Image: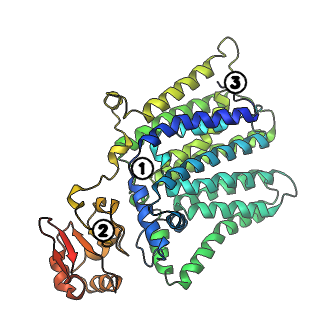
Amino acid sequence: MLRFFKSTLPAQLLVLLVLVLALRLPLLWLGLPVSAAELRLLLLGEGVGAGAWPYRDLYDSTAPLAAAAAGALELAWNRPVLLYRAGALAILLIQALRLNNVLNRADVHPERGYLAALTYLVVGSLSTQLDELSPLLIGHTFIIFALSALLPTSREGYDNRRLFRAGFLIGLAALCYLPLGLFVALGLFAVLIFAANSFRSALLLVCGFLSPYALVATVFLYVGALPSFMQLHLKRGLNFSVASVDGLPPAVALPLLVGPAVLLLLALVRTGSTALGLVFQAKFRQLMLVWLLVALAVLAVGRGLAPGSLVLLLPPLTYFGLFLWQKLPGRAGWAPELLFLVVLGSVWALRYRELVPGLQGLLRLPAESRFAPQPAPAYSRLGAAGPVLVLGPDRRPYLSHPAARPYLDWPLAEEDFGHLNEYAAVVRIAASFDGQLPAYVIDQRGLMPSLRYLLPGVFGRYEAVANQPGVYQRR
């Protein structure tokens, strides 16, 4: 199989696409429940699509470019879960083929072909989190595109605009998922080993990185959301608990990274024993080692639990995997083929473990779908008359009802609702619901008696729904 993909003919690309679709589409066809990360984007998309501004009209720490993407998809279709799944698949394909093209054009490996894209897409099918749209997956696309803009700095008289573009793309990635801004360190290392004028080139890269933030900050300044943008995105974006709030439990998320990590370690060992002929190839290997270190740093920020974390390991694994799939000298030339078949079989087993009786127990690894929010039968009888405000961490009511603005995220809402003994918090709550009252309030924390007493003009309009404890309907 590996020998077949060591070619750049269109037939190899077609077979690659068929193989990946055959690996991924059956599970998507059977249906994946909406994950916590997707539900957050859906709620944001509903608000942004209706004209609300993140951080001003919607209290959530999701990065602005990811929120804008969710709003754009919402304009195309109401609650576009199908578009999310198609978009995630398209993004992964674009990343794999773009990285494959860059590696082939740069001649970083003696052999050309689609082995890089094959590795990227097969290992990327391991976790169903990469079947779901997430800010990290969206932002990682800009990191892949920034790589080609960093490589021409190896030539004398390089075009400085490419360095600015590389920084700009990394800035766009950070506007999707802030920890991706750490990839500026990768750009600075590329400048150090490639550029003729390192200081000037580094300034161009940094200016390119800051430019998207300057543009976005200016927009939020004019709409009156700049302080909230700094508080919710910049200050909270690197918070460990925020980065992984929608991810899987550690007992599921971390074991899913063990297999790619072991494969990456084998690839590193194989790469270390391979001599490189060109100076540029040696420098590129150093660049990918730094890429791996930066990816591990981004993983550490999210504690390995951020939705889509596996995608961070795919580019270094793809590059170093090219050496792992090389034919071994002597009679062991079949070993790489056998290893790849083992990898392909392992990916299939882990991906479809929920459908094979007893496999989850044997692997001691429950399926990711078990941790997705499930519809709450207790709220199924609520009408669809309007948005719902949930006072608590259980977001299941939002699966079937739109969220009331501006409180979309309970940890942020709790900063107000958890301090009802403070005058400033009560004033902020009253101002937030000025003229936009939700149809229902689902009180999971027993706050409605205090809210009725403190804000009778807002919450005094609600009455308890019969036979549904904690549910209040606007009169």
Q: CA distance from mark 3 to mark 1?
A: 36 Å
Disc 1 secondary structure class: loop
Q: CA distance from mark 1 to mark 2?
A: 34 Å
The residue identified by callout 2 is 384
Q: CA distance from mark 3 to mark 2?
A: 57 Å
The residue identified by callout 3 is 3
Q: Is residue 46 left or right of residue 222?
A: left
Report x, y in % for residue 31. 41, 44
Image height of 134 relative to 104, above or below: below
Residue 431 occupies which quadrant of the picture? bottom left
Dot placed on the residue nearer the N-terminal end, 3 or 1? 3
- Which of discs 1 and 2 lies nearer the camera? The answer is 2
Q: What colour scheme has been applied to the protein in the rendered image?
A: rainbow
Mark 3 residue crowding within 10 angstroms, few (<14) / some (14–19) / many (20+): few
The residue identified by callout 1 is 305
Name the residue located 59 percent from the left edge and 49 percent from the top edge.
90
Name the residue located 51 percent from the left edge and 32 percent from the top edge.
262
Residue 139 occupies which quadrant of the picture? bottom right
Q: Is residue 407 left or right of residue 126?
A: left
Q: Amino acid at mark 1?
A: Leu
Q: Amino acid at mark 3?
A: Arg
Given contact means CB atoms under 8 Å apart, are the residues at marks 3 and 1 in contact? Answer: no
Q: Nearer the viewer, residue 355 or 286?
A: 355
